[in-house]
Image (cartoon, rainbow, N blue to C red):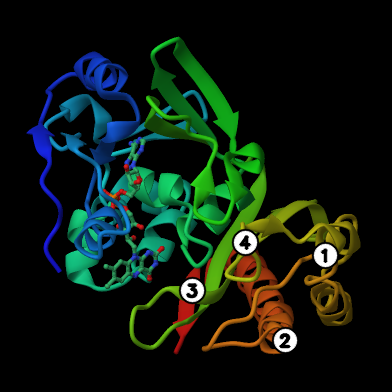
Amino acid sequence: MITGMFEYHAPEEVQDAVALLAEHGDEAKVLAGGHSLVPLMKLRLATPSVIVDLNRIAALRGIALANGGVTIGAMTTHAAIEHSAELKAALPVLPAAATLIGDPMVRNRGTIGGSLVHADPAGDWPAVALALDARMHLVGPVGERTVRAEEFFVDLLTSAVEPGEILTEIEIAIPVGRFGMSYQKFAHPASGYAVTGVAAILVLDEASGCADCRVAITGAGATPVRAAHTEVALRGSALDDATVTQAAEQAGNGIDFLGDLYASEEYRKQLVRVYTRRAVIAALHSATRGTGAVAAKTI
Ligand SMILES: Cc1cc2nc3c(=O)[nH]c(=O)nc-3n(C[C@H](O)[C@H](O)[C@H](O)COP(=O)(O)OP(=O)(O)OC[C@H]3O[C@@H](n4cnc5c(N)ncnc54)[C@H](O)[C@@H]3O)c2cc1C
């Protein structure tokens, strides 16, 4: 359980980190909180010969509200999101979901950027980012680009970040109008990772029906996915109990479910139905009553 030898760099500017990655090519790996990368290195499943540590780059940390949206630096820790008063007011699902990640040690070191780039199929942020239609800002040797969450999660443990690129910040628009949001997960009892997690964002019309919605699921297949059939069933509906239940029944449609030692494909299908219903109802309650668990987990 000892890593291979590596050269260590800790630049203080994003451009210096990009230059180091360009210089060392495939040999180099970026280090954020280290809570996914370091275990892989200890098991020798990852053996980078150069580590570019982003922890001294102040520009990659922080939370800012402007122009009807929020930007979160990629190196912002789960704990900083959990305790952010601005986010609690603007996009409460973010701090609420952060409280459900791992344990205090993981939340104090782990970063939202590292979690998104790592693209763990059981990670929490991928579902929340997809439901919030987050935009990922990347910088690399050929300049900057932006990738929507929809295109960001490419495959199992594979994001759209190309070798040599760094995720710098995550931008999220605050929904307009009366909205509610929720993230509900069935957590693995040992690690806290999502066996299944569902994020729901509802925008209500004047009669408290569904003007718009986005529902995203993690822990079901290789990548997070939108529950497209559920969204169609909810949009324009009165959000009554029968409609929500029937919409949630369709949440797994079109998903290529993965099974493992902990949960079979069939079990995950059922979890997806149950947690989609819970997430939609909690989002509705947060919009209409200002109550309801914005995020909750069951073990
Ligand atoms: C015991 C335990 C419990 C956990 N429980 C949960 C849980 O309940 N839910 C959950 O979602 N996660 C959980 N995690 C994972 C945790 O959230 C990690 O922090 C996260 O997956 C990776 O973030 P990191 O900052 O540690 O990234 P690192 O481990 O440093 O990096 C991960 C990968 O992303 C790359 N990378 C990192 N940052 C960038 C960047 N800015 N640009 C480009 N590439 C980058 C690295 O090169 C590496 O390949 C758990 C981890 C542990 C150890």
Q: Residue at x 66, y 82 (%)?
A: 268
The residue pinned by badge 3 equals 194
Q: CA distance from mark 2 to mark 1?
A: 14 Å
241 on left or right of 17: right
Give neighbour class at mark 1: few <14, some 14-19, many 20+ (Cα, 10 Å): many
Q: Is mark 3 within 8 Å of ligand 1?
A: yes
Going by the numbered disc 4, the residue's amino acid type is Ala
Q: Which mark is first along the chain, 2 or 3?
A: 3
Q: Tell which tag, 4 or 2, sits nearer the viewer.
A: 4
Element under label 4? Answer: loop
Going by the image, does 273 lie left or right of 254?
left
Q: Amino acid at mark 1?
A: Thr
Regarding mark 3 in the picture, which secondary structure is present there?
Answer: strand
- Given residues 165 and 44, the one toward you in this image is 44
Circle 4 residue:
222
Instruction: Decide which of 214, 264 is in the foreground and name it.
Output: 264
* Kind of residue indicated by mark 3: Ala
Q: Position of residue 295 (x, y in %)?
A: 48, 71
Front tag of 2 and 1: 2
Q: Depth-wise, is mark 1 or mark 3 nearer the camera?
A: 3
Give the mark nearer the N terminus: 4 vs 2. Answer: 4
Which amino acid type is shown beneath numbered disc 2? Answer: Gln
Instruction: Name the image quarter holding residue 198.
Output: bottom right
Secondary element under disc 1, as helix, strand or loop, is helix
Badge 2 density bin: few <14, some 14–19, many ≥20, Cα 10 Å: some
